[in-house]
Structures are given as structure tokens and as C-alpha cells.
Image (cartoon, rainbow, N blue to C red):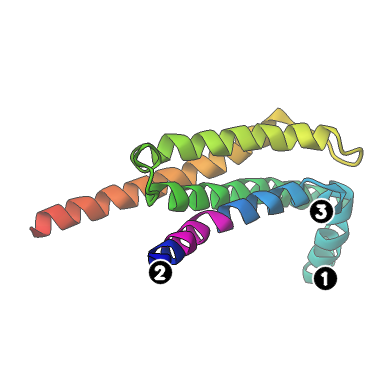
Amino acid sequence: MALMQSRSAKSFLSRYLPLVLWIGFISFASSDTFSAANTSRIIGPLVLWLFPNTSIQTLDTIHFITRKLAHFTEYGILGFLAARAFRTSALRLLSEHWLIISFALVAIYALLDEYHQSCVPSRTPSIVDSFIDMAGGLTVLLIVSWRQNRLIHASNSAN
């Protein structure tokens, strides 16, 4: 009995802990530490080291695009971790509706994240960033769903 409970607890932790830790990382990334002023201190010198003749305007564009890609990527990872947790859940509601529930988590957290940034003086909240976040999460969720459906069809064809 204790062995089954131990396996169940390990399964639960391995499913949900990465998701919770990533949500924590997103919250940390919404702090002053990852503000545009701070990330420009890393991205700018790196670009100038690689391309010494880069203009200020080009540097600003690269910085802007890098930050938007970071939004897309971090929420893509959130979508993947949510799908990983909910698709294999012992709760039937979660496993059957994992795509909708995962996207709802991504969308709600994207909006909460921007609200949180409105409380951080060095950050600027943007609904556009929330849409970029949601697009990143949705893109990965659709890829996971497509891959799962493909595997199911391949398995059915083999039988």
C-alpha cells in the first residue's frame, strides 16, 4: 500500500512540479531583473561583440525582437508543460480536455503576468505581450495535439 502511494506521489510530482516551477520562473522573469533596461545590458554588448558596426536603431530592433521571442518561447514551454501534466492526469476531466484546460492556463497566466508587470515600476504591461504569450502557448499545444493524433492514427493503422 505504501509503495503504491509512493509511486502515486512521485507520479504526481513528476507531472506537476515542472509546471509549477516554470510558472514560478515566469513570475521571476516578470520582475525588475528581466526588465528591458536590464536585458539590454546583455543583448546589446553581445550583438556589438558579434557585429561591431551595428547601429543603435538596429540594436533596439534586435533587442525588441529578442524580448518578444522570449515571451513566445516561455509560454510555449508553459503550454508544453501543461499538456504534459494534464494529458496524463489520473483525473478524467483533465486528461480528456487537456488542450482546452492547458490553453486556459496559458491565457489566464499571460494576463496575470502582464497585470503583475503593471505593479513593477521598471516594467511596462502590454496586452500585445499577452497575445504573444498566448500565441506561443497555443502553437506548442497545437503541435502536441497534432503529434498525439498522428501517433494514435499510426497505432490504429498498425492494428
Report the amino acid beneath label 1.
Answer: Trp
Report the amino acid beneath label 3.
Answer: Leu
Q: Residues within 10 Å of mark 1 (few under 14, many from 20)?
A: few
**At x 34% / y 40%, what residue is drawn?**
92
Q: Element at badge 1?
A: helix
**At x 50% / y 62%, what residue is drawn?**
14
Asked if residue 85 is positioned above or below residue 113 in the image, the reply reads: below
Instruction: Give the x, y percent position of residue 31.
Output: 82, 47
Q: Is residue 108 left or right of residue 66?
A: left
Residue depth check, mark 2 versus mark 1: number of the one nearer the observer? 2
Dots 2, 3 in contact, CB < 8 A: no
Q: CA distance from mark 2 to mark 3?
A: 57 Å
Q: Element at badge 2?
A: helix
Q: CA distance from mark 3 to mark 1?
A: 12 Å
Report the amino acid beneath label 2.
Answer: Leu
| Mark positioned earlier in the residue sequence (3 or 1) | 1
Instruction: Give the x, y percent position of residue 56.
Output: 87, 52
Q: Please identify the residue farthest to the right as the structure is shown.
A: 121
Q: Residues within 10 Å of mark 3 (few under 14, many from 20)?
A: some
Instruction: Give the x, y percent position of residue 72.
Output: 61, 46
Q: Please identify the residue farthest to the top as the structure is shown.
A: 127
Which label was assigned to residue 3? 2
Which label was assigned to residue 151? none
Dots 3, 1 in contact, CB < 8 A: no
Which label was assigned to residue 49? 1
| Mark positioned earlier in the residue sequence (2 or 3) | 2
The span picked out in magenta is: 8-17
